[in-house]
């Protein structure tokens, strides 16, 4: 994929196995994005501690709302990981930021 210069590769492996994501992230010249299916800040913590992604994508409804999403984002900032919030429920669940 690298020759095509994508912005990121989403869900490169099973998100439930951050160890696999870590291996891919370490070897990929393209940033790895994941996290839509993670529902608890400690799942994100495990992913971030293992350096399993350069971009995390918490879903505001699944992760516990705006306050929890902000906690996850602050922790991601410590690792220099970008946050691209997502919502399978559409734009109404994305407001307010």
Image (tube, rainbow, N blue to C red):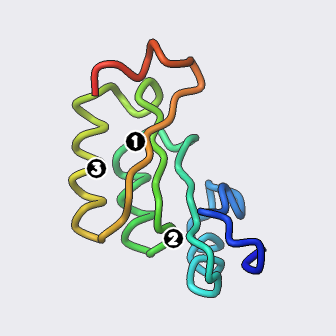
Q: Are marks 2 and 3 in contact (CB under 8 Å)?
A: no
Give neighbour class at mark 3: few <14, some 14-19, many 20+ (Cα, 10 Å): many
- Tag 2: Cα neighbours inside 10 Å, few (<14), some, or many (≥20)? many
User: How far apart in space, not on screen, are marks 2 and 3 (Cα)?
Assistant: 15 Å
Q: Secondary structure at mark 3?
A: helix
Tell me what residue is drawn at x 68 percent, y 72 percent: 5
Give the camera-side residue of 1 and 13: 1
Q: Residue at x 41, y 29 (%)?
A: 60
Question: Disc 1 or 3, which lies upstream in sequence?
Answer: 1
Q: Is residue 91 above or below residue 7?
A: above
Q: Which residue is mark 3?
A: 73
Dot 1 lies on which element?
A: loop
The image shows residue 88 at horizontal and vertical percentages of 59, 25
Q: Earlier in the sequence, mark 2 or mark 3?
A: 2
Q: Quadrant of residue 44?
A: bottom left
Which image quadrant: the C terminus?
Answer: top left
Q: Is 40 left or right of 33, judged from the image as shown?
A: left
Q: Measure how far apart labels 2 and 1 are at the Cα level.
A: 16 Å
Residue corresponding to mark 1: 40
Give me the C-alpha separation between circle 1 and circle 3: 12 Å
In depth, the one of 22 and 1 nearer the eye is 1
Callout 1 environment at 10 Å: few (<14), some (14 to 19), or many (20+)?
some
Query: What residue do we see at 36% from left, 65% from top?
Result: 81
Residue ID for mark 2: 52
Q: Is residue 48 above or below residue 35?
A: below
Please name which of the two marks, 2 or 3, marks the residue nearer to the observer: 3
- Name the quarter where the N terminus is drawn: bottom right
What residue is shown at x 63% (from left), y 87% (from top)? 27
**Left or right: 52 with respect to 69?**
right
Choose the circle earlier in sequence order: 2 or 1.
1
Q: Do callouts 2 and 1 mark residues in contact (Cβ within 8 Å)?
A: no
């Amino acid at each position: 994929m690298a020759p095509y210069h994508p912005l990121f590769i989403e869900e490169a492996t099973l998100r439930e196995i951050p160890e696999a994501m870590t291996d891919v992230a370490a070897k990929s010249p393209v940033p790895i994005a994941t996290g839509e299916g993670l529902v608890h800040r400690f799942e994100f913590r495990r992913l971030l501690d293992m350096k399993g992604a350069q971009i995390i994508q918490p879903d505001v409804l699944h992760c516990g709302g705006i306050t929890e999403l902000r906690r996850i984002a602050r922790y991601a900032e410590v690792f220099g990981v970008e946050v691209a919030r997502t919502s399978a429920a559409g734009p109404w669940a994305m407001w307010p930021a």
